[in-house]
Amino acid sequence: MGKFAANLRGRGGIKEALPAHVRPMLAQLSELPREDDSYAFEYKWDGIRAVFFCDGKKHRVETRNLHDVTHDYPELLPLAEVFRGSNVVLDGEIVALNEKGRPSFGLLQHRLGLTERNAAARKDIYPVTYMIFDVVHLEGKSLEGLAYDQRRPILESLSLAAGSWRTPPSVRGDGAAMLEAARDNHLEGVVAKRLDSPYREGKRTGEWLKIKLVRGQEFVIGGFAPLSTGARGVGALLVGYYHEAEGGAGELVYVGKVGSGYTDKDRRELQELLEAAETGVNPFAGAVKAHGAHFVKPELVAEIEFRGWTNTGHLRQPAFKGLQTDKSPTEVVKEEVSFVYGGKGGG
């Protein structure tokens, strides 16, 4: 038995080999649940979802779409030492914190898609922190069938808090106060998790809810318009989301141009990436009105902030935040806000 076996004593779990992969459980966009005493509230982190595996010797870090990013984040190698001789699967978010200790998706961009050599060099310039909010496997037992309020004490008993990882707070009830605290700390919002919810791999059941202070989601890049000045660089991205058309075939719905939020470096680097993916074929379901539009293969996903939707289904005041690497383009759909009254399963 590993050194954390005592943490499981009397807490349940099913004996099971360490899984090869785990698709993270997902949260549904929502308002605050009306009856919040059935929920625990956590802060929503503006980063990359990451699952940490350790078999007692070696560790591995995967994104939500099962990409191995172990070498991108050498800061997490010491976390494997914590679990040497044990085995574990943790779920959390990799974030880059600014000088005020707040998550910055812009800073995190400097750590995405790096070679192992560059990652080692940049970890001192743009360090990351792993916010660990769930444990789904420990010491040869799957904990996925346990309720959240059973898994959370196990996670807290591991005392995971060091230089590059921590276990952020979880507060039962009073979601409005937690959301206000998120606002005061300039965070993205909160996540409400039903106390009785098991860990449902890869599912978005409504048992976990995300409440955002600023509207934003991922969109697929289907093209770009050049800078009107003639300088090299992207002037605007043409973006959309996938919608199930009649007959089951997915179609890419155009939601408009995103012309703000870029640094000069962003504009140049995006043009280089997108020029390599140019096809000349419009990937969107309908016509796109954008002067000088260049269409590309819909392979990249961007994180976009916006202020709402127009009557024609376009984004209001959209701004580019960065490229999102942990979500496949075909997973990108329009997020609809739900209203939850505290019933089981988010209904």
Image (cartoon, helix red, strand yellow):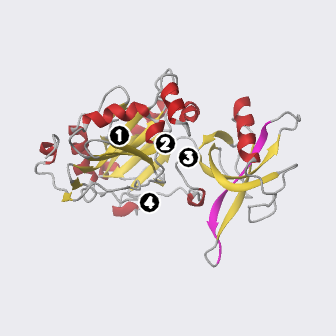
Q: Nearer the viewer, residue 328 or 188?
A: 328
Image coordinates of residue 239 in percent, x first then y, are: 70, 52
Image coordinates of residue 146 in percent, x first then y, are: 24, 56
Q: Is residue 123 above or below residue 24?
A: above
Disc 2 vs disc 3: Cβ atoms closer than 8 Å?
yes
Q: In the structure shown, which secondary structural element does the residue marked by tag 1 occupy?
A: strand
Name the residue carrying label 2.
48
Name which of mark 3 and mark 4 comes first in the sequence.
4
Q: Is residue 194 above or below residue 163?
A: below
Name the residue carrying label 1.
132
Region of the chain picked out in magenta, as a range: 233-246
Q: Is there any visible trace of residue 97 in the rendered image?
A: no
Q: In the structure shown, which secondary structural element does the residue marked by tag 2 occupy?
A: strand
Q: Nearer the viewer, mark 1 or mark 4?
A: 1
Horizontally, is 243 left or right of 120 in the view? right
Image coordinates of residue 90 in percent, x first then y, are: 33, 45
Instruction: Tell me the residue at 33%/62% (across/down).
Output: 344
The quadrant in which residue 85 appears is: top left
The quadrant in which residue 206 appears is: bottom left
Q: Rounded to the nearest whole Å, what is the CA distance between mark 3 and mark 4?
A: 19 Å
Q: Is residue 129 above or below residue 219?
A: above
Instruction: Tell me the residue at 27%/41% (across/down).
Output: 57
> Mark 4 is on which residue type?
Arg
Image coordinates of residue 218 in percent, x first then y, are: 59, 49
Disc 1 vs disc 3: Cβ atoms closer than 8 Å?
no
Name which of mark 1 and mark 3 comes first in the sequence.
1
Name the residue carrying label 3.
325
